[in-house]
Image (spheres, rainbow, N blue to C red):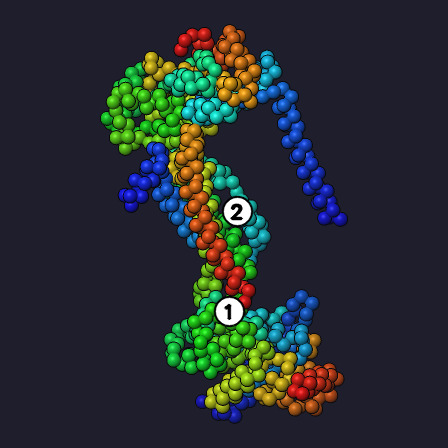
Amino acid sequence: MRTTEETRQSFAIRMRNVEKRIGEFQLKIEDLTLEEGRIHGFIGGNGSGKTTAAKLMMGILSPDAGTIERKDLGPRDITMTSQRPYLLHDTVYANLVYPLRVRGRKPEESQVRALLARFGLEDKAKQYARSLSSGEQQKLSMLRALIFEPRFLIIDETLSNMDPESVEQFEEMILDIQKKNPVTWVIISHRLSHVYRLCDRLHFFSRGSVLASGTGDEILFKSSEPEIRRFMSKEMIRSGSAES
Amino acid sequence: MRKKFTAVLAVAAGVALMGSCVAAQEGAEEKGRLMMATTTSTADTGLLDYLAPLFLEDTGWELQWDAVGTGEALKMGENGDVDIVLVHAKASEEEFVENGFGVERFPVMYNDFIVVGPKEPIAATDDIEAVFTQITEDQLSFVSRGDDSGTDKKEKKIWAALELDPTSNEQYVESGQGMGATLTMADEMQAYCLTDRGTFLKLKKDADVSLELEIVCEGAKDLLNQYGVIAVNPEKYPEVNNEAANAFIEWICSDEVQELIGEFGVEEYGQALFTPNAGTDN
Amino acid sequence: MNVIEKLVGSLFSDVGVYDAIRVTLCMSVCSTLLSSAIGIALGLALERFSFPGKRIVVRVNRTLMGVPPVVVGLVVYMLIMRRGPLGFLGILFTVRGMILAQTLIITPIICGMTYSYAVKTAPAVRVFARTMGANRRQTSILLVREMKYELYFAMISGFGRSISEVGAVMLVGGNIKGNTRTMTTAIALLKSQGIFHEGLTLGLLLLVMAFVIQCLADFLRREVQEEENY
């Protein structure tokens, strides 16, 4: 039996000297360690390598060089949702329970319905999943990722098209889960507001590498990296104008 | 650059293709064309391939033909789709003339029908009645054309004359195809088959997979197969090429061409495929 | 059944039309099912695995999709004739022989269509299956399920091709009345007898069947499109 302290210190995934080339784009990560049971945020501009790093962690891509260690994480313990989620040619309900079926678990219908109801999808259980709005599709894919209680979860821009209320609900849900049974999270976003509040640690990506890792305050307010400062000031203006 | 080249190539190919089509048409128009509907046997034996160039040389008309069953050939004549018919079903031909579709029927030649099949169990004979009776009684395999062609009609007539129902024989099948295809099937199925001698000899000699069928019945009187030639009536269909049709009839009934018909096939098959008999009343 | 038989019989002269319809359906259904099993498996395998010469295989497949059926008929005939390498099977001039020929004609079509659909669909499905923790077998099942409308469409195309084919069926089947005569070869025979109107009626019947199949295919295609335009 491991103590809580040990669990805190150990990592879920660690990437060492990983290189991956996709066309013109080159990803190069010297050391990226994601501590177990924490909520990690990947931030950075478009094309900075956030999603590529996530896919490498998932095993969807394999690295050209370097090592990716997954500690005690089997293929059934980890999952990832994306901005444009893949939905099965089937009903909302069938989509939601698919990961349970993969694991040979019988879905409890009342529980599933309650979950749908919580996000306003209760009337749409029998609807064809791809006929949902893109925000609803993202909600569905979030629920589908959460329903089987994964131990490692990557949320790639999935909150971006959702209404603010739902985003808040999911944030609450994430924090709830975290209190009960710590899960390792990676939340990828180019929106600071989505990650800052939730995340224990931030990893700032730029041009295919991790520029800095640390707590939110360390990265965003104490960093001397000019690129991070530029990103910050733009974000401030954007969120400022959005709120006014 | 490459795109341009491809485009030029495509255009050039198109022009060449069009040119060749036009050229082919011009060639046909220059001399005039005689369109004939005939039975598969005259075409399958190669007789028409042999006669057509000679006809062109002698008269300047180009002979083209569509080889189908007798029934269909007469139908094409009735519709005015062809200028002339060369078929072998005397009763139908006479009806064709009586109904005003044809001008006059001229006998040209005959060949004979034979029964072919495996050597066992039917021994070679000239008794067609015995052969057909044995086939039905012993339930031997038999391939009928079943396509209402002259040959098919002949076969049905023999069954009828013997008051036999061929379909009571489970091994009796109808191919619904031409003589060549039906013979090939009979060979494959080791079945008996009524055929004209010409098609059988030609197939026996030329087929890639040599036929194992043998003649089991020949020489019977009622196995003769008379061919007649009829020009389609220009009074009914003014657009038909009656001039060429008459030229063909006169030409094919001439002593010279009759002699050529009598020689056709002798060199290749050791026997004549057709016996000329123009001028008789067959 | 008897009423239909009589009705059909009263419409046509004695070329065995009722049997021809039965033979046509039997042959087409059997060959479509066989081709679907082989073609879908091959198409998916072709998408799944890369190997040297794969592009050539794909190209050959595309060529075979347009092969003149009568050529296939000739090749099959030569294979299964009494003195051919497969003559011992004794399937020349039988419906089984026709099914063999049809299967060879349709399989490349179904395989090629499956392959091109799979190329579009499979990568996303595979990534999704990975994120859901599906194992290899579950991923394969999922892929087939996700492509089901496209696969139905490929099967219907194969079936449509099968019922309308005449050359190979004539050669290999022999157009034997009541036995290997199909609707198309019956039409060829009726034409050769000069009975055009019955041939046309039978042709219309075939057209109606093709129309029904076309509607089915159209319906599925629309479904596929609607799904994509979300």
Q: Is residue B268 above or below residue A178?
A: above
Q: Give the residue drawn at x 52%, y 53%.
A: C113
Give the structural element (helix, strand or loop) at label 2.
helix
Return the mark for residue A118. none
Query: Which quarter of the figure has residue A202?
Result: bottom right
Tell me the residue that label 2 is attached to. Answer: C65
Query: Residue C184, image x and y in percent?
Result: 43, 38
Query: Residue B281, image x and y in percent?
Result: 41, 9
Q: Nearer the viewer, residue B166 or A2?
A: B166
Task: Name which residue type carries label 1.
Answer: Ser
Give the structural element (helix, strand or loop) at label 1.
helix
Return the mark for residue A131. 1
Task: Name which residue type carries label 2.
Answer: Met
Q: Give the residue drawn at x 68%, y 70%.
A: A25
Give the crowd class for mark 2: few <14, some 14-19, many >=20 residues within 10 Å.
some
Q: Nearer the viewer, residue A143 or A167?
A: A167
Q: Do labels 1 and 2 share a chain?
A: no
**Residue A179 visible in image:** yes
Chain letter for the residue marked with disc 1 in the picture: A
Per the model, the C-alpha gap separating discs 1 and 2 is 35 Å
